[in-house]
Amino acid sequence: MASKYHNLSDYDINSVPDATGMKVGIVVSEWNNNITGALLEGACATLEKNGVAKDDITVMTVPGSFELIFGATQMAKTNVDAVIAIGCVIRGDTPHFDYICEGTTYGLARLNATQEKPVIYGLITTNDMQQALDRCGGKMGNKGDECAVTAIKMVDYARKMGKLAAVH
Ligand code: DLZ
């Protein structure tokens, strides 16, 4: 989680499994696209740095963060090994923020628990634009990098569990 103790881009490359051959689907929300675009760039750069081929990254856009649920559900049905959902919700003057954040988070969590592929939560929820900027390549790093590393680790985890299940 982003906090003053954790720069989102701070990871030990040696602790990341080799991602050669992994296929990753990324669903990106168009709302606040100055933020989501930077998160997407960070995610793609980190996936490629760790061995994912450019052609093995599938990117699709959806209008808003709430649509990430449907977008990620459909993406998980394709031949990707993991899905990263990227969005940014910034608090406004009404309770709308809370409904979108809760609905999207619940939807993605449910999806993560109810099908076979890992779904990575790349939803930034902030009080203002500056906090969002800080988390897409600013002083808090880039949450897109963190999502990419998490996706690679979870695909590796799923593969290991698949091998274990085959033995038992
Ligand atoms: C409507 C809305 C608002 C007010 N704010 C955001 C936001 O900060 N970030 C975001 O990704 N989407 C926002 N949306 C759009 C909703 O996610 C959704 O697209 C619409 O409610 C239509 O389902």
Image: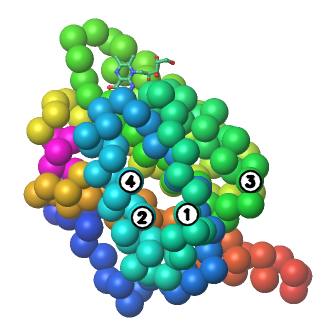
Question: 102 or 14: which is nearer to us?
Answer: 14
Q: Is residue 124 visible?
A: no
Q: Tag 1 or tag 4, which sits nearer the N-term?
A: 4
Q: Is residue 114 magenta?
A: no
Q: Residue at x 34, y 58 (%)?
A: 41
Residue 98: quadrant of the picture: top left
Residue placed under numbered mark 4 in the picture: 40
Amino acid found under the numbered disc labelled 1: Ile
Mark 1 lies on residue: 57
Q: Position of residue 7 (x, y in %)?
A: 20, 64
Residue 49 image-quadrant placement: bottom left
Mark 1 and mark 2 lie on one chain; the one further toward the N terminus is: 2
On screen, 86 above or below 54? above
Which secondary structure lies at badge 4?
A: helix
Label 4–label 1 contact, CB within 8 A: no
Residue pictured at 33% horizontal, 61% vertical: 42
Classify mark 2: helix, strand or loop: helix
The residue lying at 50 percent from left, 39 percent from top is 61
Q: Residues within 10 Å of mark 4 (few under 14, many from 20)?
A: many
Earlier residue among tags 2 and 3: 2
Disc 1/disc 3 C-alpha distance (Å): 12 Å
Which residues, given as a range, are shown in magenta?
Answer: 131-135
Cα distance, mark 3 to mark 4?
Answer: 19 Å
Above or below: residue 69 compared with residue 136 = above
